[in-house]
Image (cartoon, rainbow, N blue to C red):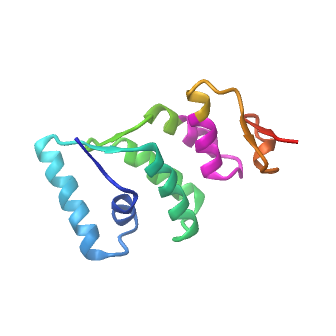
Amino acid sequence: MRAIDTNVLVRFLVGDDENQAKKVYDLFKGAEQTGERFFVPLLVVLELLWVLESVYDVPRREILESLNELTFMSVLRFESQDVIHRFIDAAYGNLFDLSDLLIAHSSKDSGCDKVLTFDKRASSHELFEMIE
C-alpha cells in the first residue's frame, strides 16, 4: 500500500492545477480498476483542514462535506476513520477550530481525558483544559 500526501487531496478537491488534478483523477480511476487503496494518515487530514481553510478559504461546511465524501471513496483508507467521522459530526453546529477538534477527538480515541492548552477559545470545549 502507498500513502498519499496532502497536496494530492488538495489537487483532487480544489483542482487548482489542472494537470495535477487530472493525474490524481487518473490515479484514483486506475486504483478503482485494480483494487488498490491509498493510505491517508491522520496528519494529512489535519493539514488538509488547515490548507482548505487558510489558503483556499473554503467554507467550513464544504470542508466537512468533502472530507466525509473522501472517507467513503473505495480507493482511500483513512487512519482512524472512526475518529474522523466523530470529528465531522462534532464539528457541525459550533465554531471551534477544525484542527483543534480533530486533535481533541484523536486524543480522546487514544485514551486521553483532556487536551491541555493555552488556547482560551479551545479551552471552552469539554475535551480541552486550560493551563492556568
Q: Position of residue 89 (x, y in %)?
A: 58, 39
**Quarter holding the C terminus?**
top right
Q: Nearer the viewer, residue 73 or 125?
A: 125
> Magenta region: which residues?
86-106
Q: Magenta segment, principal secondary structure?
A: helix
Query: Which residue is at a point 57% across and 55% down the rendered structure image?
Result: 61
| Count of numbered marks | 0
Q: Nearer the viewer, residue 6 or 15?
A: 6
Residue placed furthest toward the left: 34
88 inside magenta stretch:
yes
The answer to which quarter of the image holds residue 29 is bottom left
Left or right: 30 as drawn, with respect to 91: left
Query: Which residue is at a point 12% across and 46% down the rendered structure image?
Result: 33
Q: Against 14, is 109 above or below?
A: above
The answer to which quarter of the image holds residue 20 is bottom left
**Quarter holding the N terminus?**
top left
Q: Position of residue 128 (x, y in %)?
A: 74, 38
Query: Which residue is at a point 25% across and 61% down the rendered structure image?
Result: 24
Q: Position of residue 9 (x, y in %)?
A: 37, 58
